[in-house]
Image (tube, helix red, strand yellow):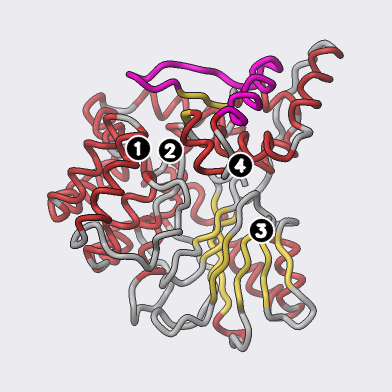
């Protein structure tokens, strides 16, 4: 499984590195909403969450679907503007200006990313803003995710302009509350990393710089295809004439262990790579329990289910649809994972949802948790 990026004929000068304040704000919000994904950031997340104004905290909950279990492409709007530079702006305010330039159809599709099991499967399909069937599908999928997701989806579709204003104001308030100071602290490190990797690219070439970015990245001998080792299938091209050619690498201080690839149809591909890999604390368990967990994780389908469940709660039916198997098969796999103490189950209205226990999984080892969250 992997995501591939076709770079055939792409000029070397169209491959670059740049920091993005808005993309980093997205990752900071994700860390606040999913602290279990980022144990190395525990001090920052706990301090920042405690200092949040209650009104701002409530407003963040309204749209946390855009950064909690997936990462909406809205936060890399620079990659979706036809005729644009394809590069992030230097400041958060300037990047929000770029977001304002994104047309409504792209804005809505990116904002509803959290509603889709296959994130980019409908990228070239009809817009839910204009097509009744596409709208019904978006709302049906949102409904299965819960009442908050459904309410947000209806709001985005019925009042796109209002949501755009609301989102910009929310990002500006986050900047004032905590992100401006955070960016002043981490921005120089990102700029230094960008300069270093740009020099490596120029002097040693693409294979060398990919190795520095992540061991999960590679390129073929003919320098025609970049491959990202992830537990997901996907492909895109860096020479799409709709958006102009280019491949961009964006660093993040908050992103580990996520290695993100923006590969939406009609968008310039972006690889969002983490700086550093903090060690996870370990806690010894019984040999019998460890054996049970290793056996549970040895099955490839249970690995795929763990990838889903690490990001958000899922029902049995959703997992069956996402992985192309029957609901009884999913139930049998979930039973094995539950006996190993790896998942938690809760009832949400008429739905029974399952989610990976990240604190438990983190104790198994950083390689596994990095693999399923990459």
Q: Residues within 10 Å of mark 2 (few under 14, many from 20)?
A: many
Label located before the other in sequence (4 or 2): 2
Residue behind mark 2: 68
Vertical position of residue 138 compared to residue 128: above or below: above
Picture disc at residue 301:
none
**174 left or right of 242?**
left
Secondary structure beneath dot 1 equals: helix
Q: Nearer the viewer, residue 217 or 209?
A: 217
Residue behind mark 3: 2
Asked if labels 4 and 1 touch by Cβ distance under 8 angstroms, the answer is no
How far is disc 1 from disc 2 in space, using C-alphas?
A: 5 Å
Which circle, 4 or 3, is nearer the viewer? Answer: 3
Residue behind mark 4: 373
At horizontal 70% and vertical 30% (from top left) the residue drawn is: 280
At horizontal 56% and vertical 35% (from top left) the residue drawn is: 326
Q: Within the image, what quadrant is residue 8 found in? A: bottom right
Q: Does the magenta portion include 87? A: no
Label located before the other in sequence (4 or 3): 3
x then y, percent, for residue 175: 32, 45
Q: Where does the magenta region start and end?
A: 328-352
Label located before the other in sequence (3 or 2): 3
Q: Nearer the viewer, residue 54 or 144?
A: 144
At horizontal 60% and vertical 21% (from top left) the residue drawn is: 343
Q: Residues within 10 Å of mark 1 (few under 14, many from 20)?
A: many
Residue behind mark 1: 64
């Amino acid at each position: 499984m992997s995501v591939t990026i076709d770079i055939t004929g792409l000029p070397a000068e169209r491959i670059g590195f740049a920091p993005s304040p808005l993309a980093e704000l997205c990752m900071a919000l994700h860390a606040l909403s999913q602290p279990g994904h980022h144990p190395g950031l525990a001090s920052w997340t706990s301090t920042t969450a405690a200092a949040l104004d209650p009104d701002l905290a409530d407003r963040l909950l309204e749209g946390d679907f855009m950064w909690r279990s997936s990462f909406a492409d809205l936060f890399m709007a620079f990659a979706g503007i036809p005729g644009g530079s394809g590069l992030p702006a230097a400041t958060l305010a300037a990047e929000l200006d770029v977001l304002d330039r994104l047309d409504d159809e792209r804005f809505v599709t990116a904002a509803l990313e959290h509603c889709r099991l296959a994130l980019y499967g409908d990228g070239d399909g009809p817009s839910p803003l204009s097509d009744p069937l596409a709208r019904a599908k978006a709302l049906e999928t949102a409904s299965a995710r819960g009442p908050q997701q459904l309410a947000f989806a209806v709001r985005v579709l019925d009042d796109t302009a209002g949501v755009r204003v609301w989102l910009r104001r929310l990002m500006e308030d986050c900047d004032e509350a905590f992100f401006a100071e955070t960016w002043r602290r981490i921005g120089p490190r990102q700029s230094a990393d960008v300069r270093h990797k740009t020099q490596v690219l120029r002097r040693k070439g693409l294979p060398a710089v990919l190795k520095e970015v992540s061991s999960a990245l590679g390129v073929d001998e003919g320098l025609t295809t970049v491959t990202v080792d992830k537990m997901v299938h996907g492909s895109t091209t860096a020479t799409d004439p709709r958006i102009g050619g280019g491949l961009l690498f964006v660093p993040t201080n908050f992103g580990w262990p996520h290695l993100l690839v923006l590969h939406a149809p009609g968008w310039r591909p972006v690889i969002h790579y983490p700086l550093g890999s903090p060690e996870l604390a370990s806690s010894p368990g019984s040999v019998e329990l460890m054996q049970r967990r290793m056996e549970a994780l040895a099955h490839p389908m249970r690995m795929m289910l763990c990838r889903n469940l690490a990001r958000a709660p899922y029902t049995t039916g959703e997992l069956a649809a996402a992985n192309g198997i029957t609901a009884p098969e999913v139930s049998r796999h979930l039973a094995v994972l539950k006996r190993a103490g790896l998942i938690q189950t809760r009832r949400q209205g008429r739905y029974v949802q399952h989610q990976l226990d990240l604190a438990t999984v983190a104790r198994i080892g950083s390689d596994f948790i990095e693999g399923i969250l990459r």
